[in-house]
Image (tube, rainbow, N blue to C red):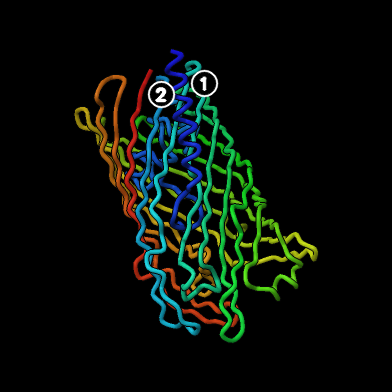
Amino acid sequence: MKQRKVTLLVSVLFITVSLLCGGRVFSAGLYLSQLNSPVSLGTAGVNNVVNNIAADAAYTNPAGMTGVERDTIMPGFQLIIPEVKFDASVATAGGDDGGNVGEAALIPGFNAVKVLSDKWRLGFAITAPLGGGVDYGDNFVGRYGATRAILSGLGISPSLGYKINDRVSVGVGVTAIYTNMDLDIAINRPGSLPDGKVSIDKIDDWSAQGFAGLTWQVTDKAMLGFIYRTKSEIELEGDLAIKDAPLLNRITGDPDTVEVDFDVVQLFGVGLAYDVSDDLRIIADFDYEDWSEFSDNYISINARNEMNTAIDRNWKDTWHAGIGALYRVDSSLMSAGVAYDSSPVDDEDRTFDLPADEQLKFGASYGRFVSDNFSWFLGLSYVWLGDGKIDQTNQGVRVKGEFDSNYFVSIGGNMRYLF
């Protein structure tokens, strides 16, 4: 027993450190709905709200944990492979298109449920709930908007589920979110002078986001699920450096630190599961995300001359809808799903540091129940990230174009052990 506890602790620590790498592509908002559970991945995230069969309910909807009948641990991974290429039609300062600006990322994860009694469940999850990033290179056509922008998030979520009766369960939890951001922007200097650079290096913050869920078995075949996530206020602080731009240094007074404030917004989700037979379940979900609240970003530069400014990104609220199915035959479980997420920003307001757009997602997974205690699952998804059209003028330089290749493939796997 002692050896098992030590092994589990080492695994959790490894996952915690690895998750700080975060994702490398921007989603429709900043939330990543396809978690490193292959059933979530394999249904394009559609199963999240009505999940009452697996330990990842500890994060996706804690009320669903009451459907887990035995103590369960579920470690896993998700490999994200992006193909994100910008094609410029107008670039008044020259430069290149940056090639594939997305970076592959391996994202481990961990979920666990403890059965406390017939009515109570205790859950724990380590996830990457938000993030994304692009690395265009220093000679990118849009370098005066951004050359590199990485936002990553690690979520550590304890949760509690309670079965009110045979039909209704509720759950609550809180996610401690560690957010980390890097940002590089080129400075356009006059004449033939080489570009300068502003670098915001690994600014970070811990914040909290609450969540609450409900599952309601309306009939013997139909179940409704609900999830709500609160707003989380992020205040990132860290190092700021300005290179080869002496005029800007004189204006700001040799800055050395910066603070960037924004909100990770509230989310309302509802899902439906319908058991067509003992082997086939049809699922659907819809959510509404309040990304207009993220639109206002506040920046404070700490130096001899303190500077404060606000940026309105003109983001708007988004919605998500999807449909999928789970099918069990003998000792196998298969899933599939398709989902759509609307864009948080109009084409004329999209920027190179956060080039978010609409999404169309397809997923499928396969799992095998090896024994009463052990099973494994593999999942695959394809996510189209939209055209990502941009027409921006930064520092007197106009760049117009779109991402003609803009997608990522995600491969996930996990194993589940029941005690």
Report whether 95 appears left or right of 252: left
Q: Quadrant of the N terminus?
A: top left
The image quarter containing residue 252 is bottom right
Kind of residue sitting beneath label 2: Thr
Report whether 231 appears left or right of 289: right
Q: Residue at x 57, y 32 (%)?
A: 172
Q: Residue at x 58, y 81 (%)?
A: 193
Q: Nearer the viewer, residue 225 or 303?
A: 303
Q: Which residue is mark 1?
A: 120
**What is the residue that sits farthest to the bottom in this orientation?**
191
Q: Which residue is mark 2?
A: 72
Q: Position of residue 238 (x, y in %)?
A: 66, 53
Other residues around mark 1 within 10 Å, as few (<14) / some (14–19) / many (≥20): some
Cα–Cα span, label 2 and label 1: 14 Å
Q: Residue at x 33, y 42 (%)?
A: 412
**What is the residue that sits farthest to the left in this orientation?**
330
